[in-house]
Amino acid sequence: MAKLCIALDTNLPQALELIKALRGYPLIFKVGYKLFISHHRAITDRVKENNFELFLDLKLHDIPNTVKEGVLSAKDLGADYLTIHISSGEEALRQAVAVKGRVKLLGVSLLTSLSEEDLKSMGVCLSKEQYVLSLAKRAVELGVDGVVCSGQEVKRLKEGIEKSFMAVVPGIRLEGDPIEDQKRVVDIEGALQSGADILVMGRSILRAQNPVKRMEEILLKLA
C-alpha cells in the first residue's frame, strides 16, 4: 500500500493545527524550506511527538562533507526521510549513505517544475526520461533508498532499475486542482498505477474547506 505524505507548505499555526487534527492517521509530514528555516524544531519536534514520520525536504546539494554534515543533523532531528539532489555527485552520495543510519535518503532527480525545454536550456542533451533514469539508476546503485520523480517517470524507473527502491511522487493533483508551478503532474490513480510508493500532496489538502475529510478521501484511494 502506498503512503500519503502531506507537504506542510503553510504557516506554523495552520501546520500545528493540522498535525493535531490528524493525530492517529498513518501519515508522513513533509517539512520544507518555508517552515524549517523559520521554525526549525518548533515544527519538526511536533511532527515526531505526535508519532508521525518526518520527511525533511531540504534537497541537500553541496560539496561532499557539507552534505554529510547535513545528513548527520537531520538524524539528530529524528528525520525518517531526507532529500538530496542526485546531481550533488557520487562522492556526496557515498558520504551521505555512509552516515545516514535509519534515515531514508531520497534522491531528487528532476524537479517536477522543469520540462524537457528547461533541460535543453541548461545544456543537457538527454531527453528528460533518459536524464532521470541515468541519475536515478546511479543513485540507487550507490545506496540511496528512494527517488523523487514525476509520476510520469515512475514506470520506466521501476522497469529500468533492478535494485528495489521507493518512488516518491510529488505533483499529485485531484480533479479540478490548478497545476500552477508544477509541469509534470499526475492524478492519484495514475501515480498508483505507475508504481508510486509515496504520494506527496500539499495544496489539495491544505486548501480544502475540510482538510481532514479530504485527507480521508485520499487515504481511501490508497487502500
Image: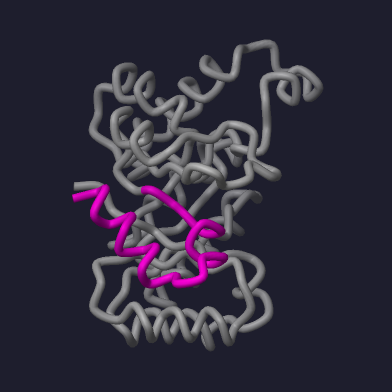
Q: Is residue 24 left or right of residue 176?
A: left
The spot of residue 54 in percent (x, y) is 39, 69
* Residue drawn at x 71%, y 23% as measured from the top left: 119
* Residue drawn at x 25%, y 22% as measured from the top left: 162
Between residues 37 and 94, which one lies in front from this camera angle?
37
Between residues 62 and 24, which one lies in front from this camera angle?
24
Instruction: Say if residue 172 shows up in the picture.
Output: no
The spot of residue 81 in percent (x, y) is 39, 59
Instruction: Say if residue 89 shows up in the picture.
Output: yes
- 49 in the magenta segment: no
| Stretch of the chain drawn in magenta | 199-223
- Above or below, comparing residue 101 to residue 111 in the picture: below
The spot of residue 61 in percent (x, y) is 63, 49
Q: Is residue 213 left or right of residue 73?
A: left
* Residue drawn at x 34%, y 77% as measured from the top left: 22
- Above or below, comparing residue 159 to residue 97 in the picture: above
Q: Is residue 164 left or right of residue 32?
A: left
Number of on-image labels: 0
* Residue drawn at x 40%, y 44% as measured from the top left: 168
